[in-house]
Amino acid sequence: MTTFYNTQHPVIENNKLVLISNGGSRSIIGIRAARKQLADLESKSNLRASSIETRDTLRNAVALWDAQK
């Protein structure tokens, strides 16, 4: 089992999709970029653990965005 200490969670601020790390840094990603990165990761097989974590974060971000509409 791999433990990641720098985790991210998505929020929507000022109608923009933002990933906030547990350290407090903000990364404005936008929904188009999130969907593109998610599609790229889902098209690959044999992902590393960190890529799986990123994929899951992006899935949560897209779900959050779709739930607000």
Image: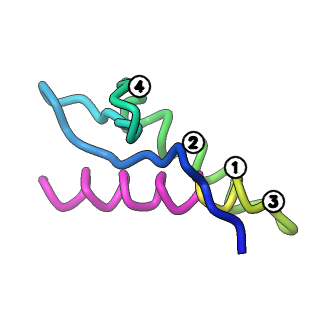
Give the residue pinned by disc 3: 48
* Mark 4 → mark 3, Cα distance in angstroms: 22 Å
Amino acid type assigned to the residue bearing label 2 in the image? Lys
| Marks 4 and 3, the one that precedes in the sequence | 4
Instruction: Specify the principal SS of the magenta part.
Output: helix
- 1 and 2 marks in contact (CB < 8 Å): yes
- 1 and 4 marks in contact (CB < 8 Å): no
* Mark 1 → mark 3, Cα distance in angstroms: 14 Å
Tell me where the magenta segment starts and ends, as one range: 54-69
| Marks 1 and 3, the one that precedes in the sequence | 1
* Mark 1 → mark 4, Cα distance in angstroms: 19 Å
Amino acid type assigned to the residue bearing label 4 in the image? Ser
Q: Name the residue located 32 percent from the left edge and 61 percent from the top edge.
A: 63
Q: Which label sits on residue 40?
A: 1
SS of the residue under disc 1: helix
Give 31 or 26, whichever is nearer the viewer.
Answer: 26
Q: Which label sits on residue 36?
A: 2
